[in-house]
Image (cartoon, rainbow, N blue to C red):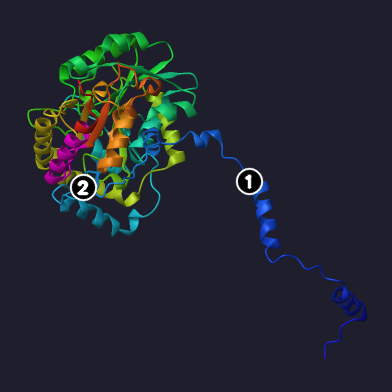
Amino acid sequence: MLKIPESIKNNIFSKMNQKTEILPANYQNSEKKEKKAANKLKASNFSLNSCNYLLEQLSSMNYTSSSNKVPIKFTMGNLSAYGRPEISLPYEGYDSIRKAIGSQTNHGYNNSQGIPAARSALAKVFSGPSFPLTEKDIFITNGSGIALLYCLLAFCDELDNILVPDVGFPFFINAGKIYNVQVKTYKLNPKDNWKLDLQDLETKIDSRSKFIFLINPTNPLGTVYPKEHLIELLALAKKKGIAIVADEIYAHMVFKNTDFISIGHLTEEVPVITMCALDKLFLAGGWAIGWLCFYDRFGILDDVKKGMANLAQIYLHPTTFIQAGLPEFLEKVPLTYVKENIMPFLEENRDFLKKEIDSIEGLEMIVPMGTPNVSILVKIKEFCIFKNDKEFAQKFMEEENVATVPLSCFYYDGELQDAESKIQGFRILSCAKKEDYVELVERLKDFTEKYRRRK
Protein backbone atom coordinates (compact mmCIF):
# COMPACT_ATOMS: atom_id res chain seq x y z
CA MET A 1 0.00 0.00 0.00
CA LEU A 2 1.30 3.41 -0.99
CA LYS A 3 2.19 5.47 2.10
CA ILE A 4 1.65 9.28 1.93
CA PRO A 5 4.47 11.24 3.60
CA GLU A 6 3.43 13.09 6.77
CA SER A 7 4.51 16.50 5.37
CA ILE A 8 2.22 16.19 2.38
CA LYS A 9 -0.63 14.80 4.48
CA ASN A 10 -0.51 17.69 6.94
CA ASN A 11 -0.48 20.22 4.10
CA ILE A 12 -3.59 18.69 2.54
CA PHE A 13 -5.52 18.62 5.82
CA SER A 14 -4.57 22.20 6.66
CA LYS A 15 -6.00 23.43 3.32
CA MET A 16 -9.20 21.44 3.88
CA ASN A 17 -9.72 23.04 7.29
CA GLN A 18 -9.30 26.61 6.00
CA LYS A 19 -12.49 28.72 5.96
CA THR A 20 -13.84 28.74 2.42
CA GLU A 21 -15.43 31.97 1.12
CA ILE A 22 -18.72 31.33 -0.65
CA LEU A 23 -18.70 33.13 -4.02
CA PRO A 24 -21.50 33.71 -6.54
CA ALA A 25 -22.02 30.84 -8.97
CA ASN A 26 -21.21 33.10 -11.93
CA TYR A 27 -18.06 34.53 -10.31
CA GLN A 28 -15.60 32.82 -12.61
CA ASN A 29 -17.64 33.62 -15.74
CA SER A 30 -17.99 37.30 -14.83
CA GLU A 31 -14.28 37.50 -14.07
CA LYS A 32 -13.49 36.00 -17.47
CA LYS A 33 -15.82 38.47 -19.14
CA GLU A 34 -14.09 41.40 -17.43
CA LYS A 35 -10.69 40.11 -18.48
CA LYS A 36 -11.93 39.51 -22.01
CA ALA A 37 -13.28 43.05 -22.25
CA ALA A 38 -10.08 44.48 -20.86
CA ASN A 39 -8.02 42.58 -23.42
CA LYS A 40 -10.18 43.48 -26.42
CA LEU A 41 -8.04 44.57 -29.35
CA LYS A 42 -8.95 47.09 -32.03
CA ALA A 43 -8.87 46.13 -35.70
CA SER A 44 -6.48 47.99 -37.96
CA ASN A 45 -7.71 51.01 -39.91
CA PHE A 46 -6.41 49.19 -42.99
CA SER A 47 -8.82 46.29 -42.50
CA LEU A 48 -11.77 48.44 -41.46
CA ASN A 49 -11.44 50.50 -44.63
CA SER A 50 -11.00 47.49 -46.90
CA CYS A 51 -14.68 46.75 -47.50
CA ASN A 52 -16.40 46.72 -50.88
CA TYR A 53 -17.72 50.26 -51.44
CA LEU A 54 -20.89 49.20 -53.26
CA LEU A 55 -21.80 46.68 -50.55
CA GLU A 56 -21.00 49.32 -47.94
CA GLN A 57 -23.48 51.69 -49.57
CA LEU A 58 -26.15 49.00 -49.79
CA SER A 59 -25.64 48.02 -46.14
CA SER A 60 -26.66 51.56 -45.15
CA MET A 61 -30.11 50.86 -46.58
CA ASN A 62 -32.85 48.88 -44.90
CA TYR A 63 -33.90 46.10 -47.27
CA THR A 64 -36.91 45.03 -45.22
CA SER A 65 -40.54 45.74 -46.02
CA SER A 66 -43.80 46.03 -44.16
CA SER A 67 -45.63 45.03 -47.33
CA ASN A 68 -47.15 41.58 -47.74
CA LYS A 69 -46.52 41.71 -51.50
CA VAL A 70 -44.30 39.04 -53.01
CA PRO A 71 -40.69 40.34 -52.83
CA ILE A 72 -38.92 41.29 -56.05
CA LYS A 73 -35.16 41.57 -55.66
CA PHE A 74 -32.84 43.15 -58.20
CA THR A 75 -29.69 43.55 -56.10
CA MET A 76 -27.94 40.27 -56.94
CA GLY A 77 -25.46 40.35 -59.81
CA ASN A 78 -25.70 36.61 -60.52
CA LEU A 79 -27.67 36.05 -63.72
CA SER A 80 -28.51 32.51 -62.64
CA ALA A 81 -30.13 33.69 -59.38
CA TYR A 82 -33.41 34.87 -60.91
CA GLY A 83 -35.23 31.60 -61.44
CA ARG A 84 -34.75 31.10 -65.18
CA PRO A 85 -33.22 27.66 -65.92
CA GLU A 86 -32.44 28.67 -69.52
CA ILE A 87 -30.01 31.28 -68.20
CA SER A 88 -27.22 28.95 -67.19
CA LEU A 89 -23.90 27.52 -68.27
CA PRO A 90 -24.28 24.64 -70.75
CA TYR A 91 -23.64 21.07 -69.63
CA GLU A 92 -20.33 20.94 -71.52
CA GLY A 93 -18.94 23.69 -69.30
CA TYR A 94 -19.74 21.85 -66.09
CA ASP A 95 -18.53 18.57 -67.56
CA SER A 96 -15.07 19.93 -68.32
CA ILE A 97 -14.63 20.88 -64.67
CA ARG A 98 -15.98 17.53 -63.45
CA LYS A 99 -13.32 15.77 -65.48
CA ALA A 100 -10.62 17.98 -64.03
CA ILE A 101 -11.79 17.27 -60.46
CA GLY A 102 -11.36 13.55 -61.08
CA SER A 103 -7.64 13.84 -61.82
CA GLN A 104 -5.38 13.39 -58.82
CA THR A 105 -2.85 15.83 -60.28
CA ASN A 106 -5.30 18.74 -60.15
CA HIS A 107 -5.52 19.19 -56.39
CA GLY A 108 -2.16 20.69 -55.46
CA TYR A 109 -0.32 23.97 -55.76
CA ASN A 110 0.79 25.17 -59.17
CA ASN A 111 2.40 28.17 -60.82
CA SER A 112 1.38 31.27 -58.85
CA GLN A 113 0.61 33.15 -62.08
CA GLY A 114 -1.72 30.36 -63.17
CA ILE A 115 -1.41 26.89 -64.68
CA PRO A 116 0.54 27.29 -67.96
CA ALA A 117 -1.98 25.26 -70.00
CA ALA A 118 -4.85 27.43 -68.71
CA ARG A 119 -2.94 30.62 -69.46
CA SER A 120 -2.16 29.37 -72.95
CA ALA A 121 -5.84 28.61 -73.54
CA LEU A 122 -6.84 32.10 -72.40
CA ALA A 123 -4.11 33.65 -74.55
CA LYS A 124 -5.46 31.85 -77.59
CA VAL A 125 -9.05 32.97 -76.96
CA PHE A 126 -8.26 36.62 -76.15
CA SER A 127 -5.54 37.29 -78.73
CA GLY A 128 -6.23 40.19 -81.04
CA PRO A 129 -6.33 39.76 -84.82
CA SER A 130 -2.92 41.42 -85.13
CA PHE A 131 -1.74 40.91 -81.57
CA PRO A 132 -1.16 37.28 -80.56
CA LEU A 133 -0.86 36.71 -76.82
CA THR A 134 1.21 34.02 -75.10
CA GLU A 135 0.90 32.44 -71.67
CA LYS A 136 3.41 35.03 -70.41
CA ASP A 137 0.83 37.75 -71.10
CA ILE A 138 -1.80 36.19 -68.82
CA PHE A 139 -2.28 36.34 -65.05
CA ILE A 140 -5.02 34.12 -63.59
CA THR A 141 -6.41 35.52 -60.34
CA ASN A 142 -8.85 34.81 -57.54
CA GLY A 143 -11.72 36.55 -59.27
CA SER A 144 -12.13 39.97 -60.83
CA GLY A 145 -11.57 41.98 -57.64
CA ILE A 146 -8.11 40.55 -57.02
CA ALA A 147 -7.28 41.15 -60.69
CA LEU A 148 -8.03 44.86 -60.30
CA LEU A 149 -6.18 44.97 -56.98
CA TYR A 150 -3.12 43.53 -58.75
CA CYS A 151 -3.25 46.46 -61.16
CA LEU A 152 -3.51 49.05 -58.40
CA LEU A 153 -0.63 47.59 -56.40
CA ALA A 154 1.64 46.82 -59.35
CA PHE A 155 1.31 50.33 -60.83
CA CYS A 156 0.95 52.68 -57.88
CA ASP A 157 3.05 53.96 -55.01
CA GLU A 158 1.58 56.16 -52.32
CA LEU A 159 0.37 59.56 -53.60
CA ASP A 160 0.18 58.32 -57.20
CA ASN A 161 -3.21 58.59 -58.89
CA ILE A 162 -5.47 56.72 -61.29
CA LEU A 163 -8.33 58.00 -63.44
CA VAL A 164 -11.75 56.38 -63.26
CA PRO A 165 -15.22 57.20 -64.73
CA ASP A 166 -17.31 59.28 -62.33
CA VAL A 167 -20.11 56.72 -62.56
CA GLY A 168 -19.28 53.03 -62.79
CA PHE A 169 -18.57 49.97 -60.66
CA PRO A 170 -16.76 51.67 -57.74
CA PHE A 171 -14.04 49.15 -56.96
CA PHE A 172 -11.20 51.62 -56.46
CA ILE A 173 -12.85 53.99 -53.93
CA ASN A 174 -11.86 52.15 -50.76
CA ALA A 175 -8.95 50.31 -52.38
CA GLY A 176 -7.41 53.69 -53.24
CA LYS A 177 -7.90 55.00 -49.71
CA ILE A 178 -6.23 52.11 -47.92
CA TYR A 179 -3.16 52.28 -50.17
CA ASN A 180 -3.10 56.10 -50.17
CA VAL A 181 -3.60 56.30 -53.93
CA GLN A 182 -5.63 59.22 -55.23
CA VAL A 183 -8.66 58.28 -57.33
CA LYS A 184 -9.48 61.04 -59.82
CA THR A 185 -12.74 60.98 -61.75
CA TYR A 186 -13.40 61.89 -65.36
CA LYS A 187 -16.81 62.71 -66.76
CA LEU A 188 -19.06 60.66 -69.00
CA ASN A 189 -21.22 62.51 -71.51
CA PRO A 190 -24.95 61.72 -71.10
CA LYS A 191 -25.72 63.62 -74.31
CA ASP A 192 -23.47 61.30 -76.35
CA ASN A 193 -24.43 57.81 -75.18
CA TRP A 194 -22.31 58.14 -72.05
CA LYS A 195 -19.01 58.20 -73.91
CA LEU A 196 -15.90 59.36 -72.12
CA ASP A 197 -15.46 63.13 -71.96
CA LEU A 198 -11.94 63.01 -73.40
CA GLN A 199 -11.36 66.72 -72.91
CA ASP A 200 -12.17 66.46 -69.21
CA LEU A 201 -10.05 63.32 -68.94
CA GLU A 202 -7.02 65.01 -70.46
CA THR A 203 -7.14 67.83 -67.91
CA LYS A 204 -7.00 65.30 -65.05
CA ILE A 205 -3.82 63.50 -66.17
CA ASP A 206 -0.58 64.62 -64.49
CA SER A 207 2.94 63.33 -63.85
CA ARG A 208 1.74 60.96 -61.10
CA SER A 209 -1.11 59.44 -63.09
CA LYS A 210 -0.52 55.70 -63.58
CA PHE A 211 -3.42 54.44 -65.66
CA ILE A 212 -6.82 55.28 -67.11
CA PHE A 213 -9.51 52.89 -65.91
CA LEU A 214 -12.06 52.03 -68.60
CA ILE A 215 -15.25 50.01 -68.05
CA ASN A 216 -16.61 48.52 -71.27
CA PRO A 217 -19.40 47.39 -71.46
CA THR A 218 -20.40 49.56 -68.52
CA ASN A 219 -22.05 48.91 -65.20
CA PRO A 220 -24.65 50.25 -64.38
CA LEU A 221 -25.47 52.01 -67.67
CA GLY A 222 -25.01 49.16 -70.18
CA THR A 223 -23.04 51.32 -72.62
CA VAL A 224 -20.88 49.56 -75.22
CA TYR A 225 -18.21 51.82 -76.69
CA PRO A 226 -17.72 51.79 -80.48
CA LYS A 227 -14.36 51.18 -82.13
CA GLU A 228 -13.94 54.83 -83.15
CA HIS A 229 -14.30 56.06 -79.57
CA LEU A 230 -11.81 53.51 -78.25
CA ILE A 231 -9.30 54.62 -80.89
CA GLU A 232 -9.76 58.23 -79.72
CA LEU A 233 -9.04 57.14 -76.15
CA LEU A 234 -5.90 55.30 -77.26
CA ALA A 235 -4.71 58.42 -79.09
CA LEU A 236 -5.11 60.45 -75.90
CA ALA A 237 -3.29 57.82 -73.84
CA LYS A 238 -0.43 57.78 -76.35
CA LYS A 239 -0.20 61.58 -76.25
CA LYS A 240 -0.02 61.59 -72.44
CA GLY A 241 2.20 58.49 -72.15
CA ILE A 242 -0.19 56.59 -69.87
CA ALA A 243 -1.41 53.00 -69.73
CA ILE A 244 -5.03 51.80 -69.86
CA VAL A 245 -6.60 49.20 -67.57
CA ALA A 246 -9.93 48.01 -68.97
CA ASP A 247 -12.64 46.20 -67.01
CA GLU A 248 -14.19 43.99 -69.71
CA ILE A 249 -16.03 41.60 -67.44
CA TYR A 250 -19.18 42.00 -69.60
CA ALA A 251 -17.24 41.41 -72.82
CA HIS A 252 -19.47 40.11 -75.64
CA MET A 253 -22.60 40.41 -73.46
CA VAL A 254 -24.21 42.70 -76.03
CA PHE A 255 -27.53 42.82 -77.81
CA LYS A 256 -28.09 42.25 -81.52
CA ASN A 257 -26.81 44.93 -83.87
CA THR A 258 -24.12 45.78 -81.30
CA ASP A 259 -20.52 44.60 -81.49
CA PHE A 260 -18.08 44.42 -78.62
CA ILE A 261 -14.46 45.24 -79.44
CA SER A 262 -11.76 44.84 -76.83
CA ILE A 263 -9.55 47.90 -76.57
CA GLY A 264 -6.63 45.49 -76.30
CA HIS A 265 -7.23 44.46 -79.91
CA LEU A 266 -6.84 48.03 -81.12
CA THR A 267 -3.63 49.00 -79.39
CA GLU A 268 -0.38 49.67 -81.23
CA GLU A 269 1.94 51.65 -78.98
CA VAL A 270 -0.25 52.16 -75.91
CA PRO A 271 0.12 49.45 -73.23
CA VAL A 272 -3.25 47.99 -72.26
CA ILE A 273 -4.29 45.48 -69.60
CA THR A 274 -7.78 43.99 -69.85
CA MET A 275 -9.63 42.22 -67.05
CA CYS A 276 -12.26 39.52 -67.55
CA ALA A 277 -13.58 36.60 -65.53
CA LEU A 278 -15.95 33.65 -65.48
CA ASP A 279 -18.41 35.75 -63.43
CA LYS A 280 -20.66 37.24 -66.11
CA LEU A 281 -19.50 36.03 -69.50
CA PHE A 282 -19.63 32.38 -68.43
CA LEU A 283 -22.32 32.62 -65.72
CA ALA A 284 -20.02 31.23 -63.03
CA GLY A 285 -19.30 34.01 -60.54
CA GLY A 286 -18.97 31.63 -57.60
CA TRP A 287 -15.99 29.91 -59.19
CA ALA A 288 -13.84 32.99 -58.48
CA ILE A 289 -11.65 32.82 -61.58
CA GLY A 290 -10.49 36.06 -63.18
CA TRP A 291 -7.61 36.97 -65.46
CA LEU A 292 -5.58 39.85 -66.82
CA CYS A 293 -4.37 40.08 -70.42
CA PHE A 294 -1.32 42.24 -71.22
CA TYR A 295 -1.41 43.87 -74.65
CA ASP A 296 2.05 45.39 -74.55
CA ARG A 297 3.81 45.07 -77.88
CA PHE A 298 6.97 46.92 -76.84
CA GLY A 299 7.39 45.65 -73.28
CA ILE A 300 6.57 48.98 -71.66
CA LEU A 301 4.95 47.13 -68.77
CA ASP A 302 7.71 44.56 -68.19
CA ASP A 303 8.47 46.01 -64.76
CA VAL A 304 4.76 46.04 -63.89
CA LYS A 305 4.59 42.38 -64.89
CA LYS A 306 7.49 41.61 -62.57
CA GLY A 307 5.77 43.36 -59.69
CA MET A 308 2.53 41.57 -60.44
CA ALA A 309 4.34 38.22 -60.43
CA ASN A 310 5.56 39.04 -56.92
CA LEU A 311 2.00 39.83 -55.85
CA ALA A 312 0.81 36.53 -57.30
CA GLN A 313 3.24 34.70 -55.02
CA ILE A 314 1.51 36.31 -52.04
CA TYR A 315 -2.12 35.84 -53.10
CA LEU A 316 -1.46 32.54 -54.91
CA HIS A 317 -3.60 31.11 -57.66
CA PRO A 318 -7.32 30.23 -57.64
CA THR A 319 -8.66 26.68 -57.49
CA THR A 320 -6.33 24.31 -59.33
CA PHE A 321 -8.93 21.92 -60.78
CA ILE A 322 -10.99 24.75 -62.31
CA GLN A 323 -7.85 26.11 -63.95
CA ALA A 324 -7.02 22.62 -65.18
CA GLY A 325 -10.47 22.36 -66.76
CA LEU A 326 -10.25 25.74 -68.51
CA PRO A 327 -8.64 24.54 -71.79
CA GLU A 328 -11.51 22.14 -72.51
CA PHE A 329 -14.05 24.57 -71.05
CA LEU A 330 -12.99 27.36 -73.44
CA GLU A 331 -13.12 24.97 -76.41
CA LYS A 332 -16.69 23.87 -75.65
CA VAL A 333 -18.12 27.20 -74.43
CA PRO A 334 -17.21 29.93 -76.94
CA LEU A 335 -17.05 33.65 -76.15
CA THR A 336 -20.22 34.13 -78.19
CA TYR A 337 -22.28 31.66 -76.12
CA VAL A 338 -23.99 34.26 -73.93
CA LYS A 339 -24.64 36.67 -76.81
CA GLU A 340 -26.24 33.95 -78.92
CA ASN A 341 -28.09 31.99 -76.23
CA ILE A 342 -28.76 34.26 -73.26
CA MET A 343 -28.91 37.87 -74.43
CA PRO A 344 -32.10 37.37 -76.53
CA PHE A 345 -34.03 36.69 -73.28
CA LEU A 346 -32.57 39.82 -71.71
CA GLU A 347 -33.29 41.88 -74.80
CA GLU A 348 -36.96 40.89 -74.71
CA ASN A 349 -37.19 42.11 -71.11
CA ARG A 350 -35.24 45.27 -71.93
CA ASP A 351 -37.64 46.19 -74.74
CA PHE A 352 -40.68 45.54 -72.55
CA LEU A 353 -39.26 47.73 -69.79
CA LYS A 354 -38.40 50.53 -72.20
CA LYS A 355 -41.95 50.72 -73.47
CA GLU A 356 -43.54 50.59 -70.01
CA ILE A 357 -41.11 52.80 -68.06
CA ASP A 358 -41.32 55.61 -70.60
CA SER A 359 -45.07 55.76 -70.01
CA ILE A 360 -44.56 56.53 -66.30
CA GLU A 361 -44.27 60.25 -65.63
CA GLY A 362 -41.10 61.15 -63.74
CA LEU A 363 -39.11 58.08 -64.86
CA GLU A 364 -36.83 57.51 -67.83
CA MET A 365 -34.92 54.41 -68.82
CA ILE A 366 -31.38 54.45 -70.19
CA VAL A 367 -31.53 51.86 -72.97
CA PRO A 368 -28.58 49.49 -72.49
CA MET A 369 -26.62 48.26 -75.52
CA GLY A 370 -25.42 45.24 -73.55
CA THR A 371 -25.05 43.68 -70.06
CA PRO A 372 -27.99 42.65 -67.85
CA ASN A 373 -27.92 46.10 -66.21
CA VAL A 374 -30.86 48.46 -66.66
CA SER A 375 -30.72 51.98 -65.21
CA ILE A 376 -33.94 53.88 -64.60
CA LEU A 377 -33.61 57.62 -64.01
CA VAL A 378 -35.83 59.30 -61.44
CA LYS A 379 -36.63 63.00 -61.83
CA ILE A 380 -36.41 63.65 -58.11
CA LYS A 381 -37.85 67.16 -58.26
CA GLU A 382 -41.10 65.79 -59.63
CA PHE A 383 -41.74 63.89 -56.40
CA CYS A 384 -42.73 65.46 -53.13
CA ILE A 385 -40.76 63.78 -50.31
CA PHE A 386 -37.51 62.46 -51.80
CA LYS A 387 -34.23 64.37 -51.64
CA ASN A 388 -32.28 61.76 -53.59
CA ASP A 389 -32.44 58.33 -55.19
CA LYS A 390 -31.52 56.49 -51.99
CA GLU A 391 -34.63 57.84 -50.30
CA PHE A 392 -36.69 56.90 -53.36
CA ALA A 393 -35.30 53.34 -53.42
CA GLN A 394 -35.69 52.98 -49.64
CA LYS A 395 -39.35 54.01 -49.66
CA PHE A 396 -40.04 51.87 -52.72
CA MET A 397 -38.60 48.90 -50.84
CA GLU A 398 -40.56 49.60 -47.67
CA GLU A 399 -43.93 50.05 -49.37
CA GLU A 400 -43.72 47.88 -52.49
CA ASN A 401 -41.19 45.19 -51.45
CA VAL A 402 -38.92 45.78 -54.45
CA ALA A 403 -35.15 45.82 -53.84
CA THR A 404 -33.09 47.96 -56.25
CA VAL A 405 -29.65 49.60 -56.25
CA PRO A 406 -29.61 53.43 -56.21
CA LEU A 407 -27.48 54.87 -59.01
CA SER A 408 -25.71 57.14 -56.54
CA CYS A 409 -24.01 54.02 -55.17
CA PHE A 410 -22.04 53.90 -58.44
CA TYR A 411 -20.67 57.42 -58.13
CA TYR A 412 -17.08 57.84 -57.04
CA ASP A 413 -17.74 61.35 -55.77
CA GLY A 414 -20.26 60.42 -53.12
CA GLU A 415 -20.39 63.89 -51.58
CA LEU A 416 -21.91 65.24 -54.79
CA GLN A 417 -24.48 62.50 -55.27
CA ASP A 418 -27.34 64.95 -54.62
CA ALA A 419 -26.05 67.63 -56.99
CA GLU A 420 -28.07 68.42 -60.08
CA SER A 421 -25.15 67.37 -62.26
CA LYS A 422 -25.49 63.78 -61.03
CA ILE A 423 -28.04 61.37 -62.38
CA GLN A 424 -30.53 59.98 -59.88
CA GLY A 425 -32.30 56.68 -60.20
CA PHE A 426 -31.90 52.97 -59.60
CA ARG A 427 -30.46 49.90 -61.29
CA ILE A 428 -32.27 46.63 -61.87
CA LEU A 429 -31.35 43.62 -64.01
CA SER A 430 -33.06 42.22 -67.09
CA CYS A 431 -32.53 38.50 -66.38
CA ALA A 432 -35.65 37.77 -64.31
CA LYS A 433 -38.94 36.26 -65.46
CA LYS A 434 -41.31 38.33 -67.58
CA GLU A 435 -44.01 38.26 -64.90
CA ASP A 436 -41.60 39.93 -62.46
CA TYR A 437 -41.33 42.93 -64.77
CA VAL A 438 -45.07 43.11 -65.32
CA GLU A 439 -45.51 43.25 -61.55
CA LEU A 440 -42.63 45.72 -61.17
CA VAL A 441 -44.23 48.15 -63.61
CA GLU A 442 -47.57 48.02 -61.80
CA ARG A 443 -45.94 48.75 -58.47
CA LEU A 444 -43.91 51.60 -59.96
CA LYS A 445 -47.06 53.17 -61.38
CA ASP A 446 -48.83 53.03 -58.03
CA PHE A 447 -45.80 54.27 -56.11
CA THR A 448 -44.93 57.20 -58.37
CA GLU A 449 -48.56 58.28 -58.59
CA LYS A 450 -48.75 58.36 -54.80
CA TYR A 451 -45.71 60.63 -54.37
CA ARG A 452 -45.80 62.76 -57.50
CA ARG A 453 -45.99 66.52 -56.95
CA ARG A 454 -49.33 67.97 -57.88
CA LYS A 455 -49.11 70.92 -60.22
Q: Secondary structure at mark 2?
A: loop
Is residue 124 visible from the viewing direction of this image? no
Point 31% across, 45% down: residue: 65
Q: Are marks 2 and 1 in contact (CB under 8 Å)?
A: no
* Callout 1 amino acid: Lys
* Callout 2 amino acid: Tyr
Quick check: 222 above or below 404? above
Quick check: 43 above or below 242? below
- Quarter of the image with the N terminus is bottom right
Q: Position of residue 69 (x, y in %)?
A: 23, 48
Q: Is residue 288 left or right of residue 264?
A: right
Start and end of the magenta stretch?
429-448
Magenta stretch prevailing secondary structure: helix
Mark 2, other Cα within 10 Å: few <14 / some 14–19 / many ≥20: some
Q: Position of residue 294 (x, y in %)?
A: 30, 28
Q: Is residue 58 left or right of residue 269?
A: right
Quick check: 67 above or below 418? below
Q: Earlier in the sequence, mark 2 or mark 1?
A: 1
Q: Which residue is mark 1?
A: 40
**Of 439 and 172, the residue lying toward us:** 439
